[in-house]
Structures are given as C-alpha cells and as structure tokens.
Image: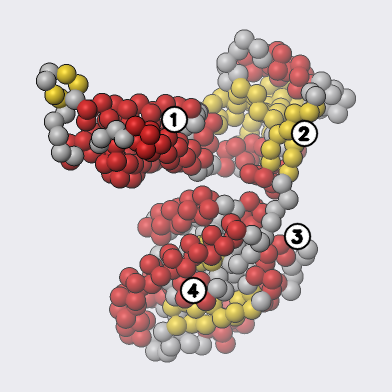
Amino acid sequence: MTGAAVVTELLAPGPLVAAGALGPALRVAVLVVGSWLVLLWLAHTRDPAILGSGGTEYTRVAHASGLAFGMLSIVFLVFQIPGLRMQLMVALPLGLLTLLVSRWLWRKRLIRDREHGECVSRVIVAGTRDDVEYVIDKLVHDPHHGYLVVGVTTTDGGKDPIDVDDHPYPVIGPVRRTAACGRAAGADTIVVASTPDDDRDFVRRLGWELEGTAAELILCNRLTDVAGPRLSLRPLDGLPLVQVRIPGFEGGIHAIKRAMDILLSLIALVPITVIAPFIAMAILMDSPGPVLFRQLRVGRDGRQFWMLKFRTMGVDAEERREELIAHDEGAGPLFKLKHDPRVTRVGRLLRRYSIDELPQFVNVLRGEMSIVGPRPPLPSETTSYDGRVCRRLYIKPGITGLWQVSGRSDLSWDESIRLDLRYVENWSIATDLMIMWRTARVMVRPSGAY
C-alpha cells in the first residue's frame, strides 16, 4: 500500500523534496497512506475472528479502501491538492490489488501453521452430547478455522468421551463447571453448543465467571447453518432478538448477478474458442462420435434445458448404464463410478480438470445457467425431491458452486443438499467471487472429480 503511493508519486512529475523540506508530492503520499491505514483500522480488517477463512476479510479491505479514496476525492475537489488525482488513478487499483494479494499470501501461511497445530484457539465445547458432537464435527472439519477442541463439558454428567470421526474428545466435567474446566485446560475459547433446560441464566453466569480471563465466549445455534448472513441481532430492552431476513429470489441483486454472468461468459468464451478445436481433435482421435454431449437437466423453477459438455464417454454410454447400476457408488439418486469403464482416456483427463464443463458457458449466455449456483440435477433426480430439496430450483444452476469446491463426488447426498440449500438462501456477489477463485484452485489441484 505504502509502496503503491510512493511509486505513484515517483511516476508523477515534480520533485519529492523542495528546498530541503518535505515536498508537496511526498505530503500527498503521506496523506494517502495515513488515510488508508486509518480506514483499514476502523474497518477492523485485522480482527482475529475474520482471519484465515471466509471472504469477510477481503470485503472489509475493499470497502475500507474505497471509502478512503472516496474521502480523498472530496478533499481533492474542495482543496484542489496537486498530485492527488494521480494517486486516485494509480495508487487505488495498484495498492488494493497488492493489499489483497498480500492478505491472501499471509492467509496461506496462517492456514499452514494451523494445520500443524499453531496459531489455534484451544476450545471447550459445552452442552448436550448430541449438540456437542454436532459442533465439534463442524469445528474440526476444516483446520482453516483454527479451533483445537481440548475437552467438553456435558449436561448429563457422564464420563464417556465423545467420538467424532474416530477421534475421542474427553469429557472434563459437568456443564455447570465449564468456566473452571476451561481455566484448568488452558482454553481460550468456550463454545456453548446448548444450555441446560433447567438453567435459564447459564450463559449470563458463565460470562460472569469468565470475566478477567482471556477466554472468548461463543454461542452456537443450528439456525446459523440455515440462515447464515441473513442473521442480525436486535437488542430490545435487555432482550436479545435474533432477526432472520427472509430470502428473496428476485430484485436488483439478481440483475447484477445476471450481468456478471454475461460479462464473464463472454470473456471466458474467447480462450475457450481458441482451445476448443484441439480438445475436439483429441476427443475424436480417442473415440469416434460427436464432440459435444447434450444432456437434459432441470433449471430454475423446474424448467428443463439441454446442458452442453465435451463428450467424455463412448457413444454407447447410455446403453451400458443398466449393466453398471449394481456397482453404483454415487450419493443418493446420483449414479457415479470412480472407475467408470465407459469413460475414455481423454475423457478421464477432461473430467479430472473440469475441462469437459467449459461449453456450459454457452448455457450461461442463453440464461439457462449461472456461473455459480447449485448443481444442475437430472430430471430423474427431481422426482424424488421433497419440499425442502425443491428449494434448490429457486435459482439457476451453476457451472460451479459450493458442491464443486467442497469435495464434489466425494460428498454424501445429504451434505451436497445442505451446501446447495445454504447457497440458495445466503448467496452474495462476494460469495460468488470467492467460489470462482476457489474453483480455479480446485481445477489445478482436483479433488473428488471422476
């Protein structure tokens, strides 16, 4: 950031120092850097709660940078400070890009440290056994979050450890002694998965008992898995009300998503058009038949469309499907085989790196799909949908989505549905951009693609 401001001044005409004093150009650079740093600090861009996972950190950095330069623009218009225009034109995009890249590199370092047990929070989870097991499963599923569960306290008074993924977590005391057990275990975070039914003041008293310690108190509610970003807290005369914004599936934000789909698809189709003849040649040399494969899928509101893919199987794939049903390894109604004999050699390579899905950018331009969205289901799948699962069809299916960056074919059916529903009800432009970025990483280092 500082370098971007200084480089901008070096590119601008005029001396940095005049008559042995601080020159006007350098004063402008100091003004820009100082304002930028203050706004980044006020936006809490280094809050430990947002470091290491999620897109909140990057969103706050972008918002703080935009606000800083917006304020500087007003200063320039009012006082006509020379040199500030160059800062706005060069330092903002260059500095913001550098700042985001540096944050990403530091995050990679933090994630590596957390995977080795460093820079983590020692956690005690309190509640009923079922709720504690559910919370632990979410906390340890991804080491990026930086939580190390060192023990649990339960409401039933039992001593048997709680097993999650064949890992036992010791019960170190009853839930009413959570604060004392946390201090004894050296925990710096207490997660309340649920409270005793006969103790309404449990959380308040626990907060009192943790006063003067370094412990952080976190209240967990399964509602967050459904509502996520749509939750907000509204204190009302000492009564904390959790407000859940009802999801909407129309409006301006969806128009922005559609405009982004069109723009990015047009950009993506330029290199795809260049490499498509070579992919087609490889497909034809490996297996005679059509280059493109058209498959009927279900889109928004149950409308069916023909989804395009590069062909990865032999032309008799559908006829051979019945003989392979007994070996199905897919999740739920999905039919999948890790070593499907119908897949060609070139097709296996195309699938591994998701190259076979590139023609779907044409479906995006047609308005049948979006770049990011739920997985496009087959008509046969939708016949088994209940009212909950049908919510996947409230928005357009996507070329990529949470399912693709979270394991793809390795996911269970329930987990795939949960990810799709979470996206449908809580998506945002920032989430879409984050998924696109993670998709690019998954294409380079594929997992669960077969």
| Local crowd size for mark 2, using a 10 Å CA cut-off: few (<14), some (14–19), many (≥20) | few
Q: Earlier in the sequence, mark 3 or mark 1?
A: 1
| Local crowd size for mark 4, using a 10 Å CA cut-off: few (<14), some (14–19), many (≥20) | some
Query: Which residue carries the number 1 mark?
Result: 39
Q: Earlier in the sequence, mark 4 or mark 1?
A: 1
Query: Residue at horizontal 33%, vertical 70%?
Result: 271
Query: Which residue carries the number 2 mark?
Result: 241
Residue 388 circle label = 3
Q: Residue furthest right?
A: 198
Determine whether, in the image, residue 301 is placed left or right of residue 404.
Answer: right
Q: Amino acid at mark 1?
A: Leu
The residue tagged with tag 2: helix, strand or loop? strand
For the residues carrying marks 3 and 2, which lies nearer the camera in this image?
2
Where is residue 80? Give x, y as percent: 31, 35
Q: Amino acid at mark 4?
A: Leu
For the residues carrying marks 3 and 1, which lies nearer the camera in this image?
1
Q: Quadrant of residue 116?
A: top left
Question: Would you place residue 102 above or below residue 431 in this image?
Answer: above
Q: Quadrant of residue 184?
A: top right
| Local crowd size for mark 3, using a 10 Å CA cut-off: few (<14), some (14–19), many (≥20) | few
Q: Earlier in the sequence, mark 2 or mark 4?
A: 2
Determine whether, in the image, residue 71 is placed left or right of residue 368.
Answer: left
Its colouring scheme is: secondary structure
Query: Which residue carries the number 4 mark?
Result: 365
For the residues carrying marks 1 and 2, which lies nearer the camera in this image?
1
Q: CA distance from mark 2 to mark 4?
A: 43 Å
Task: Between residue 143 and residue 378, name the one nearer to us.
Answer: 378
Q: Is residue 104 visible?
A: yes
Q: Amino acid at mark 2?
A: Leu
Query: Residue at horizontal 78%, vertical 63%?
Result: 387
Q: CA distance from mark 3 to mark 1?
A: 43 Å
Q: Amino acid at mark 3?
A: Arg
